[in-house]
Amino acid sequence: MKGCIRPGRHRKLDPAVRWAPSKYDTMNQFKGEALSWELNSGVIELALHREPANEIGSLTLGELEKFAAALEKLQAHAHALIIYSTLRSGFCAGADLRELYRGTQRISKAEAIAGVRDFLERIHRVLNAIDGSPLTTIAAVHGVTFGGGFELALVCDLIIADKMARFCFPELRLGLIPGFGGIPRLKRDLGNGVIRDLLLTGRSFSASKAHAVGLVSQLAAEGEVLRVARSTATQLGKFDRETSIAAKRFIKPIPHEELRREIDIFCDLFTRPAVEAGLKKFVESTEAQPYLP
Amino acid sequence: MRTQDQTLDEILNLAATHFKVSREKLTPDDDFFKTLGIDSLQALDLLTRLENHFSVELPDYELQGVSDFRTLAGRIQARL
């Protein structure tokens, strides 16, 4: 099936790469309902596989938190992390808006906002853990890489994209801004004009466009993105770890203050009736192109 | 530079090839969602293929409400 990405199995061990000691064996692999991970030859591969399009709701968040906890120990025995999706639809369509809409329907406004803030703070902790990890991290993306999925890719050091991937921040159609750290991390990586284009028009960028503006570091042929990411991860393993960690810390600070402000702005905007109307429209939409802003 | 008819013809050829539909079954005024049997995600896939084929950027909002090949060709032609 063209464009479909399947996880590889049992790659040969490279004796030059450190291997996890047996006491961490139980953490080397995890298979959940929304995601799985495996440490092999110094590379952690985090696979997203929640149908239909890896929407990030409470289930995925819970498993991401497990991953973040495991990462603290796993990263001592690895040099790289690859995040990818096994689903044909794409890398990740973003936050689970249906869960958000339904979850905020039968509770008070104050409770809804408190719930949203709690969710955002939890996802920020996970994403900050990946962002600040001493590993060199790669998002291997294909297909839909929208909203929160785009933000998950943005925490990684490198984005490698299938040439059919598309990137988009459609949040403004809901009366919101991206809430998983998207704007501060885009500001870290790109010029302000490109960010305004993405954010204020809500249009999607092709992988070629994203590559041209410097968001994507490498383009892969259709269905080849995981292979290209693995090849890159192998290369990363050749470098002295201390040097790679020092280089990453020097060049990639986490914009903590702006990330905090983003949560506050998101929660302020969330109180307005326009947001409920936008969510309702999306959830109940029967339009042929509901993804369009 | 391509004429709009050439653009339309290339779109029909590309759609027929990628979505494995007989070229003879496609006409300019077809609703491509119905004729190709595609959903919104596959429409996004078609958009990317068209952008790559014609080397244009086609903002999603220009496709809002567009469902036939002829109008699609007009949108692309305006950016060639």
Image (spheres, coloured by chain):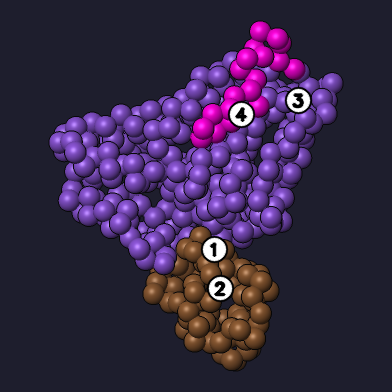
Q: Label 1's element?
A: helix
Q: Chain of mark 2?
A: B
A30 falls in the magenta region: yes
Left or right for B29, reference A1: left
Please give the range of residues in magenta: A19-38
Chain of residue at mark 1: B
Q: CA–CA distance between discs 3 and 1?
A: 36 Å
Are discs 2 and 4 located on one and the same chain?
no
Distance from the alpha carbon under mark 2 to that under mark 3: 44 Å
- Both on one chain, marks 2 and 3? no
Q: Which residue is mark 3?
A: A41
Which mark identifies residue A37?
4
Marks 1 and 2, how far apart in space? 10 Å
What residue is rendered at 49% in x and 87% in y? B29
Please, which chain is the residue tagged with disc 4 on? A
Q: Are marks 4 and 1 in contact (CB under 8 Å)?
A: no
Say if labels 3 and 4 share a chain.
yes
Chain that is purple in the image? A
Q: Which residue is mark 1?
A: B42
